[in-house]
């Protein structure tokens, strides 16, 4: 398979109009300017083309390792606002509808992802609430504290972390169907 890699933004790809059957956005829609990215996807797709937006989130449930981890993140980074998620993103439905997409459908499924404790620590060190926003010495202190939490509260060779995959699929209408503007 030959792949032609391009660098661009979701809001202005520089790719040709009405040339694609499928556009996907995985684990990234929340970073985009939704009205501009939606318009760009609509511009790229042929009539009847589809867009898929998907996301994969850990689930903080009472007493689980995610809840304990998020509590610890907030101890080190009180400004962090990404905790407490449900893995559902209803705003994305409106984003697509206002960009002129129809036939909007969603699906989700939950699964437990097994992590050895060191792998969970690595995953969290790389997260937005820790590695992407704390200075290196605080990341190290956080990691040591998370190691203690795992040893004390979640001992064992594997930590089971519940996750939800959630996706929305929508279709670009006919070429002459304008994007709708829904007042906010």
Image (spheres, rainbow, N blue to C red):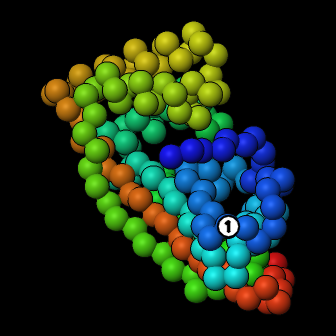
Which of the 4 image quarters holds residue 152? top left
Q: Give neighbour class at mark 1: few <14, some 14-19, many 20+ (Cα, 10 Å).
A: some
Tell me what residue is drawn at x 76 percent, y 76 percent. Answer: 99
Seen as rendered, the residue at the extreme left is 156
Image position, residue 117 (x, y; %): 28, 26
Tell me what residue is drawn at x 41 percent, y 48 percent. Answer: 58
SS under mark 1: strand
Which of the 4 image quarters holds residue 7? top right
Looking at this view, is 6 or 119 the one in front? 6
**Is residue 46 depicted above or below 130 in this figure?**
below
Tell me what residue is drawn at x 66 percent, y 44 percent. Answer: 4
From the image, tell me which residue sits under label 1: 20
Q: Is residue 134 left or right of residue 151?
A: right
Image position, residue 154 (x, y; %): 22, 32
**Is residue 1 depicted above or below 24 in this figure?**
above
Looking at this view, is 28 or 85 the one in front? 28
Which quadrant holds the C terminus? bottom right
Looking at this view, is 31 or 65 the one in front? 31
Q: Is residue 123 left or right of residue 28?
A: left
Answer whether residue 86 is visible to the viewer in this image: no
**Is residue 139 depicted above or below 36 in this figure?**
above
Looking at this view, is 16 or 55 the one in front? 16
Image position, residue 88 (x, y; %): 50, 65
Seen as rendered, the residue at the extreme top is 137
Q: Is residue 104 left or right of residue 43?
A: left
- Count the labels in the image: 1
Image position, residue 146 (x, y; %): 38, 24
Answer whether residue 137 is visible to the viewer in this image: yes
**Is residue 53 depicted above or below 131 in this figure?**
below
Tell me what residue is drawn at x 28 percent, y 44 percent. Answer: 113
């Amino acid at each position: 398979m030959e792949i032609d890699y391009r660098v661009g933004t979701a809001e202005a790809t520089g790719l040709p109009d009405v040339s694609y059957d499928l556009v996907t956005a995985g684990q990234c829609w929340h970073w985009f300017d939704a009205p501009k990215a939606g318009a760009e996807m609509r511009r790229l797709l042929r009539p009847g083309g589809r867009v898929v937006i998907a996301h994969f989130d850990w689930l903080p449930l009472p007493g689980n390792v995610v809840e304990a981890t998020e509590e610890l993140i907030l101890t080190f980074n009180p400004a962090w606002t990404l905790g407490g998620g449900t893995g559902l993103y209803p705003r994305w439905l409106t984003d697509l509808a206002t960009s002129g997409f129809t036939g909007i459908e969603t699906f989700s499924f939950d699964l437990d992802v097994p992590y050895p404790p060191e792998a969970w620590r690595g995953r969290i060190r790389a997260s937005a609430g820790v590695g992407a926003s704390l200075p290196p010495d605080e990341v190290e202190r956080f990691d040591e504290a998370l190691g203690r939490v795992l040893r004390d509260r979640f001992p064992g060779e594997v930590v089971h972390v519940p996750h939800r995959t959630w996706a929305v699929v929508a279709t670009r209408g006919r070429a002459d169907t304008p994007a709708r503007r829904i007042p906010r």
